[in-house]
Every structure is written in C-alpha cells, then in structure tokens.
Image (cartoon, rainbow, N blue to C red):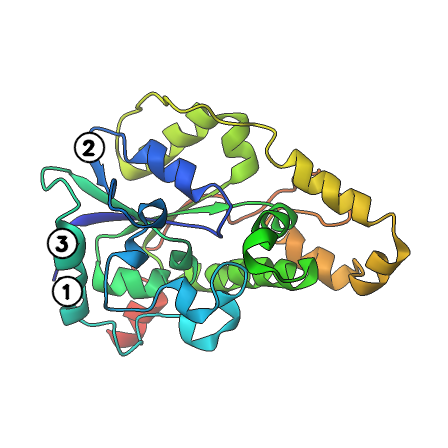
Amino acid sequence: MIDKKFIFLAGHHRSGTSLLHEIIREHPSISGLSDTGVPEDEGQHLQTVFEPANAFGGPGKYIFHPKSYMDENHALATSHSAEMIMQQWGKYFDQAGEHYIEKSPPNLIRTRFLQKLFPNSRFVVILRHPLAVSYATQKWSGTSIKSLLEHSLLGYEIFMKDMEYLRHVYVLRYEEFVANPQTEVDKIFGFLGLRSSPIKQVVNASANEKYLSMWESSRTRWINRILLPVDIHLETRANRFGYSISRCRELLGSSLLGAHHNPIPPAAQANA
C-alpha cells in the first residue's frame, strides 16, 4: 500500500483548478507537478494506467461517456496500478514534500478510484457556476450551451453521490475563492493540517461577469428560451450546489461546502 499523503484537486475544466493548483503547490510542505511539458501539468497526461479525458471526447463531453467514470470497483483499482502511477508521477515530485498534490479535471468523477489506490488521499473540489463553466468551455467543445450545462450538472451530481464514500474531502466555490482568495485558501490549508501560506498570484474577482452577461443576453431572444427553457427541474438541480439558473448572479447555501470527514466510508463498511 502506498501511504504517501496525496491531495487530489478536482473540478470541471475552466473552473479555477489550474490557479488553485498553482497556489496550493507553492506551500512549503507540498510538492506538485510542474514544468512537465503536458497541458496544465495535469497528472492524467503523465501516466499510462488509465485514459485521460481526451479519450472520451475531452472538455464538455467526457462525462457523458460511461467508461470515463471510475470507482473502487474498477478493474484498474489495484495495488499494481497505484505502484505504476506512482512510478510515473514520482520523478516530477520533490520526494521531501510532506504532501503531493495532483490536479486533473477528471478527478471529479474518479475520487473513489483514487482513494482506493492512495488511501491517505485528501480531496479538494472546486465548484463554479454551471453557466460560467459552460460558456468558458464552449470554445473547446464546440457543443451547445444546453449540452454543456447538462455536462456540468451531471459531473457535480456524480461527485455528490461519491462524496459520502470519501474519507476526507473539502468543497469550495470558485466565486467565493476569487472574492477572498487568501481566506479561502487558508481554510484549505487548515483542512490539510497545514499553516497558512501567503498567496502571490493575482486573482481576477470578476471573471464570471462576461459569461453570466452572455447568458442574460441570450435570454432576450425567444428562440434561446425555447431551446433551453429554465424549468423547475433545471433550477432545482443547480440549487443543490448553491447556484441558480434563473437568478444567475445569486449564490445560495449548499450542504456540500466545507470540510467533510467520513472515517469509515460505506464501501469499507460493506467489505468489513
């Protein structure tokens, strides 16, 4: 069993994972992947055990593919897989680091798989307004906002179901992170049992503005309201994560936010 303390950072493409990863890996007790030569230094591109998101359609599409999901029952959830991934990632980490951090968007739907491979895992999951994620991703996916919105919500729903199986997970919202970056990052460090470390990066607090404005502008056209109606079902799905589609600039409460600790996950109980 590999007992290294891993921090897995997860969230949709274009939801702030890269910036958050850059900030967290600068902590003196944390070693992260950097200067690897792969997109955004994502671990998914630095191993050959499992397929990256691009194998299933890439940003805005991959979650729709049933084979992209992985949990502790997956055929690859073995000690051999863990050892092979560790060998491939290991050359990029500083061995002296107390914690290793890895960031890849598909981690969002593979938390249980990663926890099985690396039992000492901690998960940090960042949520961003599904509309902002959808508009920001469209230039990569080339798909409709309707499809992208479904992709965003589906990813969060899968994670929410898997969350109860995770021993240690911290959930934050992008909107609160960019509004008060030092405060929010300090909460993450507290969750990890680490002291505060000052942020050096410039964080844009208004990045959502152009995407929410694009949504509001689209609603002035009747054809868009017909093609993508905001009914109670869609609104309720977004509300579960603290977001509103009809009142897109409002942040709602959500029980997912903050630190969650499940000492004995249901899967472990079932196998006991």
Rendering coords of residue 156 (x, y %): 53, 58
Q: Is residue 119 above or below residue 201?
A: below
Disc with the residue nearer the chain's start (3 vs 2): 3
Rendering coords of residue 179 (x, y %): 55, 27
Q: Residue furthest left?
A: 96
Q: Local crowd at mark 3 within 10 Å, few (<14), some, or many (≥20)?
A: few
**What residue is pinned by disc 2?**
29
Q: How many marks?
A: 3
Asked which secondary structure carries label 1, the reply is helix
Q: Residue furthest bottom?
A: 75
Q: CA distance from mark 1 to mark 2?
A: 24 Å
Q: Nearer the viewer, residue 232 or 154?
A: 154
Rendering coords of residue 16 (x, y %): 47, 41
Q: CA distance from mark 1 to mark 3?
A: 14 Å
Q: Local crowd at mark 2 within 10 Å, few (<14), some, or many (≥20)?
A: some
Rendered residue at 70%/47% (across/down): 244
Q: Which mark is residue 3?
A: 3
**What residue is pinned by disc 1?**
84
Horizontal placement of 4 versus 14: left or right?
left
Q: Is residue 136 above or below residue 65?
A: above
Q: Nearer the viewer, residue 149 or 186?
A: 149
Q: Local crowd at mark 1 within 10 Å, few (<14), some, or many (≥20)?
A: some
Q: Residue furthest right?
A: 222
Asked which secondary structure carries label 3, the reply is loop
Mark 3: which amino acid?
Answer: Asp
Disc with the residue nearer the chain's start (1 vs 3): 3
Q: Quadrant of residue 56?
A: bottom left
Rendered residue at 43%/43% (across/down): 17
Nearer the viewer's eye, disc 1 or disc 2?
A: 1
Mark 1: which amino acid?
Answer: Met
Asked which secondary structure carries label 2, the reply is loop
Q: Which mark is residue 12?
A: none
